[in-house]
Image (cartoon, grey):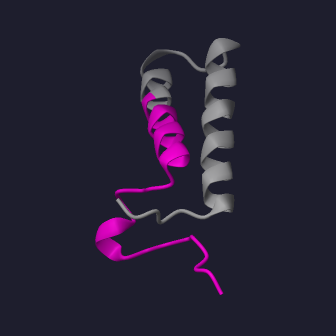
Amino acid sequence: MKKNMGTLDRSLRILAALAIAILYYTGVLSGTLAIILLALAAIFILTGFISFCPLYYPFKISTRKTGA
């Protein structure tokens, strides 16, 4: 897996996952929506930490800056 996520992309995914987790644990999110968003948050955390988004790969998208 070649890294295809830049720093801003990674940071935004991790912050979104943390926001979802906080909303869930404070009781703002519940039910089916909470389960779906928690699954999405888990994916965001995973992809954020490994710097690879499988959805970017087939479209050859990369938010990572190439070295100059």
Task: Specify the segment rendered in magenta.
Answer: 39-68
Q: Quadrant of the N terminus?
A: bottom left
Q: Position of residue 6 (x, y in %)?
A: 60, 64
Q: Position of residue 57 (x, y in %)?
A: 34, 67
The count of marks equals: 0
In the image, what residue occupies the spot 39% across and 65% down?
56
In the image, what residue occupies the spot 53% across and 38% down?
45
Depicted 33 relative to depicted 58: above or below: above
Residue that protrudes farthest toward the left in the picture: 58
The image quarter containing residue 29 is: top right
Depicted 66 relative to depicted 36: above or below: below
Q: Is residue 54 left or right of residue 7?
A: left
Looking at this view, is 11 or 21 the one in front?
11
The image quarter containing residue 36 is: top left
Q: Quadrant of the C terminus?
A: bottom right
Looking at this view, is 46 or 30 the one in front?
46
Residue that protrudes farthest toward the bottom in the picture: 68
In the image, what residue occupies the spot 44% across and 56% down?
52
Looking at this view, is 31 or 54 the one in front?
54
Quick check: is 58 in the magenta stretch? yes
